[in-house]
Amino acid sequence: MAGRVERTAIGIDLGTTYSCVAAWFDKHNRVEIIPNQQGNKITPSCVAWDGMQMLVGEAAKNQITRNPKNTVYDVKRLMGARFSDSVVQKDIESKPFKVIEGSGEKTTIVFEHESLEKKFSPEEISSIILRNLKQAAEEFLGTTVTDAVITVPAYFNDKQRQATMDAGVLAGLNVTRLINEPTSAAIAYGLDKSADVNCPEEKNVSIFDMGGGTFDVSLLKISKSGTITVKAVGGDTHLGGETFKQLMVNHCVELFKKKEKKDVSENARAKMRLKIACEKAKRDLSSTIQTPIEIDCLYEGIDFSTKFSREKFEEINAGFFIMCIKHVENCLRDGNMQKSDVDDVVIVGGSTRIPKLQKMLMEFFDGKPLCKSINADEAVAYGAAVLAANLSGNGNKKVQDFILHDVTPLSLGIWVVEDIDMSVVIPRNTSIPTIQEMVYYDSHYLHTKAGYLHN
């Protein structure tokens, strides 16, 4: 038993806004979500520099209003992306911290304190978060941890996945596998339902996974024997709770500008205070129809006060909510299923607590109740820990016997000179592993290079 503990592998949900780590415990015969140094089971994906030391998680988040220009968050959205990418440029518009173009078009984050300067890649920032989770796991387990399974959004491309692997290596981890977040949640759901004697031998399940920064939807077949077959995936790597909150912030900025004739967005500290207030209001609106937003001395000594209704929240975010349902519809089409074929709709991720999203999802599936039996904040890390145990030879028979069949989320192909689009070799949502063969001819004599693109 001691030898198995020493080989314990962890599962990590590296989230945009919050991260979580878990491990299989032979002693308890189950997965345990590992608390951080403050005793909390989720850790803010936040890193700061105060001029003397790097702060991680809650320590970083707690000082964000005092030090907004040296506090980095939402770094997951910058992973594996060039500085010139339009999505990067759009993201950094609303960020108070400095982001520049480094060598080779790489996105580079800059900390500045008096005359001191520190530069980090998004992968290095993520590695600091991962190292913090690794340390928490080692303290909790009482042993050194090297192996880990890390989750990624289903729609992450190869560069984003490689960046996640690189971050793991920088954190001192051997990343044994990357797993798509909704697939990881499906593992948690599958193990939860396998103990139910009334559960049918096979179910069609839709996973709706919306966190702070990314959105994934997947369609799977889950058998009681432990086989999980992914039929299709979809989503958006830049859609989540942060998207909804930013629209709230923009609305409040306009209210302040209209009333006071002053632009809050020009002041990093004021805007960060507004972001924090809107985050609290967004959460409150999941349980109440109206909530106050009150900030003393928001900007140039002027107070800000307004009442934000759930109706207004739903109105300004209506387009994004519709987009979410479109992704569900597309996923069903890609998986060759009708919505009536789906047995369970499982919601995962903190943003699925939004009542309007739940209502629209239920209406789309003709009133089918949503499955909330697995913890929305912990399910992804839970599934990753199960896979980590499976790969490391730990866990009970149920863990060791489960089989996972996944798909490629993006099309892979070759750019052909005559065509604008790439020539697809492996279409997205193809079951993997797979072998495909196509014949191409050189565009000119002694042509020696070829590559692949993401579609």
Image (cartoon, rainbow, N blue to C red):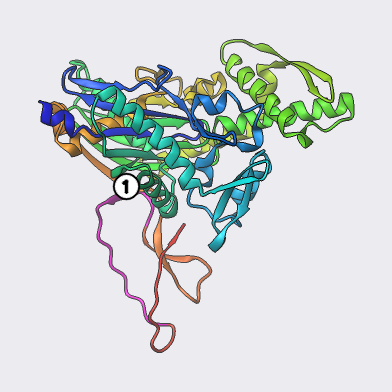
Q: Quarter of the image holding residue 222?
A: top left
Q: In this picture, which residue range is highlighted in magenta? A: 427-442
Q: Quarter of the image holding residue 129?
A: top left
Q: Residue at x 40, y 89 (%)?
A: 445
Q: Residue at x 65, y 33 (%)?
A: 68
Describe residue 248's horizontal placement relative to residue 453 as left or right.
right
Q: Residue at x 46, y 66 (%)?
A: 422
Describe residue 293's horizontal placement relative to residue 351 as left or right.
right
Magenta-colored stretch includes residue 440: yes
Q: Secondary structure at mark 1?
A: strand
Q: Nearer the viewer, residue 148 or 189?
A: 148
Judge whether residue 205 can be spotted in this image: no
Q: Which residue is mark 1?
A: 407
Judge whether residue 194 can be spotted in this image: yes
Describe residue 138's horizontal placement relative to residue 60 as left or right.
left
Classed neighbour count for the residue bearing mark 1: other residues with Cα under 10 Å, few (<14), some (14–19), many (≥20) = many
**Residue 378 percent location from the top left of the image:** 38, 24
- Judged by its main secondary structure, the magenta piece is loop
How many labels sit on residues?
1
**Residue 185 percent location from the top left of the image:** 34, 30
Magenta-colored stretch includes residue 345: no
Q: Amino acid at mark 1?
A: Val
Q: Residue at x 65, y 31 (%)?
A: 67
| Picture quarter with the N terminus | top left
Describe residue 268's horizontal placement relative to residue 55 as left or right.
right
Q: Nearer the viewer, residue 372 or 273?
A: 273
